[in-house]
Amino acid sequence: MGLFSFLKSKFGKKSEEKPEQSSSLQTYEKGMAKSRRAFASRLDELGKRYARVNEEYFEELEQILIESDVGVELSIRLIEQLLDKSEKEHITEPKKIADELVDLMFVDYATKGESIENEIQFAESGPTVLLVVGVNGVGKTTSIAKLAYRYLHMGKKVMLVAGDTFRAGAVEQLKIWADRLGCPIITGKENGDPASVAYEGVQFAKKNNIDLVIVDTAGRQQTKSNLMQELGKISRVIGKEIEGAPHETFLIIDGTTGQNGVLQAKAFKEVANLTGIVITKMDGTSKGGIILSIRDELGVPVRFIGLGERMEDLQEFDLDKYLYGLLLGEESND
Amino acid sequence: MAFESLTDRFGAIFKKLRGQSRLTEKNMEDMLKEIRMALLEADVNFKVVKAFVNDVKEKALGQDVYSKVNPSQMVVKIVHDEIEELLGADQTEITYKSKPTILMLVGLQGTGKTTTAGKLSYLQKNKLGKKVMLAALDVYRPAAIAQLETLANQNGVGFFSMGITNPVDIAVAAKKKAQEEGYDVLILDTAGRLQIDEALMKELTEINHVVHPDEVLLLVDAAAGQDAVNVASTFNKDLHLTGIIMSKLDGDARGGSALSIKYLTGLPIKFAGVGEKMEDLEIFYPDRMADRILGMGDVVTLVEKAQEAIDEKEAERQAKKMMEGEFTLEDMLHQMKQVQRIGSLGKLASLIPGMPKLTDEQKETAEREMRVFEAVINSMTPYERRHPEVLRFSHKNRIAKGCGLTNADINRVLRRYEKSKEMMKQLKQYQKTGRMPPGLGGFGGK
């Protein structure tokens, strides 16, 4: 399989010669330093304790995966595959097993859905609409600000639509961001119909040659069907005004989320055409392993990753760097 | 596969071992494996799961479940009791000794501190009659202050803010104002922060030192994963927490982090957020959480709600009448209303173990259905209600006009009534033979 060798070469290079580190790799390393330290040093320490791998070693490896919020089923499956491989190919060296694990995780992710460009895919003409959805408190509004910042810096004309008419202060919060970023914003009445705000937003975008319209929505628990239906309605209203819109729908997942993340993704996928995931708050000690389960079960790719509070800390998701940071990162920055 | 209840999982194990109702070493191992999976899928911390499963194993051996006729039920019970015990047998409520009693809410970003501050003020004002003030110490998140102010106004409680300045100074000034103006409770809403952010954690310790809150409560998201215990232990180390508030329990997250935190830190869980409205903050009940983690439904709540709602004498009278084979449309409507009083059908269904989760759509249909029944029956004359067999086409036309529905709706209600009547007869049969008729208990369906 080509992927294996591709991966090997990528990681191999990193461990042999120190490549010049791009600034984005540095952000990853810095952002994920805490996660990485915990995880990598445990892998390291595990490797040192075992001269040869045995059943206990695999049990501990499984524990490391589960404690990173990689789903239970996926963790168990990965370890079973690993065990199988270790037996068939007589791999007994812990270091090699760890490499094999990264390979397996990489291949599982890469083959579970289409590979997609991380950057927002712009419509050939007219405004491109990005709808942002998620449960409460995952960081939708902040992520929107960071995405707006990103595309403003690429020279796009960006506008925001304050579709969270429910939470107290939500419109205010987005307005402050719009002011800071210097981009137009459409707001509606508090407790008003979010679909009508979205309608006004796309109208404005069409008239003013906007490149990117980012529509905020209220956080909602995925079990509330009436609120979930409301998302469908927003999508349809936008679609009526601009063909093919919303062109992108991002689900924001909090990096500290556990197993419920899969249920979140499943439910939002049912009402909206999810084109990607943004995983936030990855600068803490959580490992965000749930994104691997989401990809494994639903095929939805991660597009961006939030690695800190600064505007530029929202980075393109890069599986290499993510797994590298998570599993194999060296303690080079300390 | 994932997320089904432990009872279902055990059921599956025994199905595999068809004809084998007794517990062996082998299926005990399988059951322990399932317990482990169920707990991990509920986001119970790995280390806690490990210790927990060992405990259960020992307990099960100690109670000699192997010789019991229904060992799987026994094991479920042991697991359930063990979780309940871990979560804390007693409810630990806040004591309002000092004036003002100061509560400080802390936690990671997005765990629901500001919303919970609003809900707490609502509960203290409306249920406990306290004079409450909310103080805005989150000077980092844009519009956090505006959000708290909106909630304060909405609830009609006091509000304190100094705009964007040092949170330690705000805390001191808020306390002073609360003392001067005779507030009973002061709630400090702090900014969300990572437990590894040293500067921000230091800010919290300073606030802690200058105002000495009576309660320092950590917000934990019900959907939080494995890392929640690390977060909690750092906050606890720095701030000497007095308890936990679980937020967002209205979703389908199992909230296993609550169990883990309790297990590892001993901190009690004091409240749980169960919805978006201001009244949606409940005192935490360990036994219900145990059911939730295991996916068993919340029988206790149901029983309590039913006790509150159903007038027992009336119920007795009804039951007697029904057993005598008398069952009129009026009785049916009355029954429906009683069920409605217990709570919306959807809530009810989610409380019954083994009952498939209704989608919101199904719930709405069922509730709409009930309204139709009510309208139709109310449009009949009292005689017609007791003797629906007299209804002819012209009667039905009149009733249809009266309730603004169609003849088809009326026929549907009547068919439903016949069916219920039939079931009542079977119930009577059951009383004699002791066997449950099939299909009893359906409600509001098609």
Image (cartoon, rainbow, N blue to C red):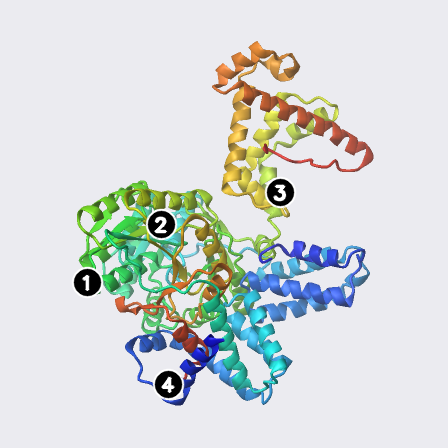
Chain of the residue displaying label 1: A
Tell which residue pokes out farthest to the front in this image.
A2
Query: Mark 4 and mark 2, same subunit?
Result: yes
Q: Nearer the viewer, residue B64 or A210?
A: A210
Q: Nearer the viewer, residue A29 or B98?
A: A29
Quarter of the image for residue B213 reads: bottom left
Task: Tell me: B163 left or right of B86.
Answer: left
The residue labelled by disc 2 is A218
Residue A9 x %, y %: 42, 82
The residue labelled by disc 3 is B303
- Closer to viewer: mark 1 or mark 3: 1
Label 1 is placed on what type of residue?
Answer: Gly
- Closer to viewer: mark 2 or mark 1: 1
Q: Is residue B25 above or below residue A265?
A: below
Task: Tell me: B107 left or right of B83.
Answer: left
Residue B249 x %, y %: 49, 53
Label 4 is placed on what type of residue?
Answer: Ser
Disc 2, SS: loop
Camera sees residue B227: no
